[in-house]
Image (cartoon, rainbow, N blue to C red):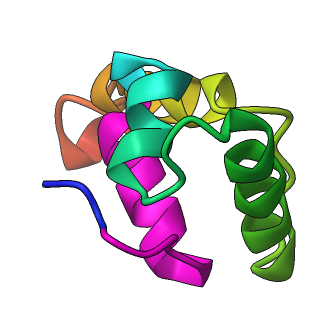
């Protein structure tokens, strides 16, 4: 469900991350920015910087989601193999 007003801060980051795989047009629409993709991306980058995360566009959020989903657990087989 798209927002009727442009989201800001963590709400914007969460919405953008949830819809990032659908592309910037869909993500901007879902986050309340309509067809104004440039304002959406600029506001998203600023919101991320405010929490100490640097992104260079919506694709950075997609990469982060995929990296988390493809994690590998590395551990010894037993305590004696530490």
Question: Measured from the top left, where is residue 36 in percent x and y?
Answer: 66, 41
Going by the image, does 75 lie left or right of 28?
left
Going by the image, does 8 lie left or right of 77?
right
Predominant SS along the magenta part: helix
Question: Which residue is painted at 37% across and 29% down in the image?
Answer: 74
Figure check: 10 above or below 67? below
Number of numbered tags placed on the structure image:
0
Question: Which residue is painted at 67% across and 30% down in the image?
Answer: 60
Going by the image, does 38 lie left or right of 34?
right
Residue 13 within the segment the image draws in magenta: yes
Q: Quadrant of the N terminus?
A: bottom left
Q: Quadrant of the C terminus?
A: top left
> Quadrant of residue 48 in the image?
bottom right
Question: Measured from the top left, where is residue 37 in percent x and y?
Answer: 67, 35
- What segment is highlighted magenta in the picture? 4-20
Going by the image, does 68 lie left or right of 35?
left
Figure check: 50 above or below 77? below
Q: Is residue 75 visible?
A: no
Nearest the viewer among 50 and 35 is 35
Question: Which residue is painted at 83% across and 73% down in the image?
Answer: 52
Q: Is residue 45 visible?
A: yes
> Quadrant of residue 35 in the image?
top right
Figure check: 30 above or below 3? above
Question: Which residue is painted at 46% across and 49% down in the image?
Answer: 16
Residue 18 within the segment the image draws in magenta: yes
Nearest the viewer among 69 and 38 is 38
């Amino acid at each position: 469900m798209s927002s009727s007003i442009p989201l800001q801060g963590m709400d914007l980051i969460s919405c953008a991350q949830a819809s990032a795989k659908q592309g910037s047009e869909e993500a901007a629409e879902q986050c309340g920015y309509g067809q104004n993709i440039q304002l959406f991306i600029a506001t998203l980058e600023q919101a991320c910087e405010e929490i100490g995360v640097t992104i260079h566009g919506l694709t950075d959020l997609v990469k982060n989601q995929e990296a988390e989903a493809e994690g590998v657990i590395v551990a010894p087989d037993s305590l004696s193999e530490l």
